[in-house]
Amino acid sequence: MSYCNRLRRTVFGVVVMTVGSVGIVHAQSSVFPTRPITFSVAYTPGSANDILVRIVSPDLGKQLGQIIVVDNKPGAGGSIGMASVAKSKPDGYTLGVGSTATMAVNRALYKNLPYDPLIDFTPVIKLAATPNVLVVPASSPVMNVADLVKAMGVKRLNYSSPGNGTTQHLAGVLFTKLVGKPAEHIPFKGPAEAVTALLGGQVDFGFVSLPSALAQIQDGKIRALAVTPLKPTPSMPNVPSLSSAGLDGFEKTDVWFGMIVPTGTPDAILQQLHSAAVKTLSNSDVKAKLAAAGYEPAPPASATDFSQFVREQVAFWADLVKSSGASVD
């Protein structure tokens, strides 16, 4: 065999081996997912986190080619569920909902947090945001923020929240601080229980996430006094902002939600999850369902953008928690 022929065979063999190797790598990267994926929610069914996940999961699962199972693990202001995600295997089969409370507030609020949001998780993509709403029972004589402040001056009122350390709890702390009137905080197991207490008139007022109470507000079972954004939300255009009542600072306390995974999840899987989530958030049906439930879908952004946003929120809430004096052991 001539030298040229041997050279051609050698080059051909190298090319075949290289192409074969690329094929193997591609096959390995396209293996995920081969079984159902768990989307862990650190709050009870009916919470804003839970409603969001149940809206996006069917289409997200379709994009990934697998069923997504929603797993609720409530407790300790979301700390129990988040710690569970942090300790799970970083293989893409356990997703978590990172939110204002679990990723930003809790880091400053809890003295012994069983996870570190800046170390234990990799942010994938921001999914949506929603306002908190100041509400009272429909049977209450309070018709607006001024009435509530006046009533707080007559006697000590109480207010509900879905639990210690939630954004609704901290919004209540901020509210009482700004109006200069004390109130008794009554924490509940989750949003559904907090809303039920308002429906039954067991508490005088409370802050609720819009998705967890929108139906009751629209049915007139709970009265909305004000929202946290600077402008009224499209779902309730006639409900004023807290800033219009002279209470500044609430505009940064909206609730946001994003997809997170345990640190160490392979980049190829991160990219696959991000791409699938972008497609889901671009789905017109999903967008319509989110809007109808009181969410504002987040515009498509990179994982890097979401990571930077989380760090900014951690800094903001750390200052707010410190100035409010709120603390949870």
Image (spheres, helix red, strand yellow):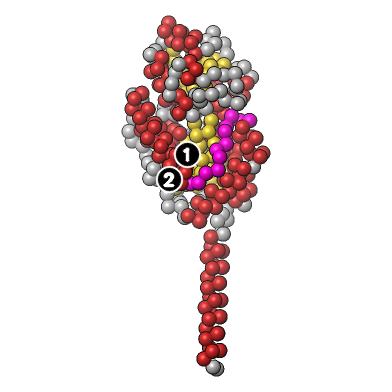
Residue at (55, 56) in percent of width and height: 32
Quickly name the residue at label 1: 98
Q: Is residue 283 magenta?
A: no
| 179 lies above or below 83 | above
Tell which of 104 and 75 is nearer to you: 104
Where residue 55 appears, x then y in whole percent?
61, 38
Residue at (44, 39) in percent of width and height: 309
| 15 lies above or below 246 | below
Where residue 323 appears, x then y in whole percent?
34, 25
Secondary structure found at label 1: strand
Quickly name the residue at label 2: 121
Quarter of the image with the C terminus is top left
Is residue 135 in view? no
- 184 vs 280, left or right, is left
* Farthest residue, direction top: 154
Tell which of 184 and 304 is nearer to you: 304
- Mark number displayed over residue 195: none
Residue at (39, 31) in percent of width and height: 317
Type of the residue with mark 1 = Gly
Is the C-beta separation of discs 1 and 2 under 8 Å?
yes
Where residue 254 appears, x then y in whole percent?
49, 29
Q: Which residues are magenta?
A: 292-303
Where residue 63 appears, x then y in whole percent?
62, 49
Quarter of the image with the N terminus is bottom right
Residue at (40, 17) in percent of width and height: 178
Is residue 258 in view? yes
